[in-house]
Amino acid sequence: MANSEQDHPFNSYFHLCGREFWTAIQNIPDVDIQCFDKIFEKVPESERMSEEQIKIQLIVNRYTNPICDSCWKKPSSKVKLYRCPECQIAMYCGDACLKAARPAHIRRCCRKDGPLDDGPQKIVFIIPK
């Protein structure tokens, strides 16, 4: 384990989830985090989530609500999802979906400057007035 992982405040959580979770946390594009900042700008700073908490929330949401980023299938006895081997964020049900989604996914995959996700796992906020 690299020093940055050993010293990380959420190390025990990463240990439970494995290296894939740590990789996914590191590969979230900055724009995903900035969405939270924009949404919660009226919340007192003392009550806001930290950047690390936001990253964890984003990945936990993806991992607990898995869906193929291409055909939108959910896992079942007939459908197994596989994570993108590079970013560990996007999920696909097979090679055909991986190939079909690749041109769009490559813009976000392991890129801190990648665009906001516009696929089935896009960030949606419902804010009461």
Image (spheres, rainbow, N blue to C red):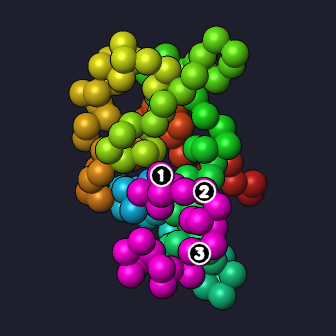
Residue drawn at x 36%, y 17% is 95
- Percent x, y of residue 105: 32, 35
Residues rendered magenta in the picture: 1-23
Residue occupying the point 36% across, 40% down: 85
Any mark on residue 10, and which?
Answer: 3
Q: Determine whether label 1 and label 3 are within 8 Å by CB.
A: no
Cα gap from disc 1 to disc 3, whole angstroms: 14 Å
What kind of element bears circle 2? helix
- Mark 1 and mark 3 lie on one chain; the one further toward the N terminus is 3
Could you tell me how far apart the alpha carbons at marks 2 and 3 are, in whole angstroms? 11 Å
The kind of secondary structure element at disc 1 is helix
Q: CA distance from mark 2 to mark 1?
A: 7 Å
The answer to whether residue 32 is visible is: no
In this rendered view, identify the residue nearer to me: 42 or 24.
24
- Which residue is labeled 1 in the image? 20
- Spot the residue most to the right: 128
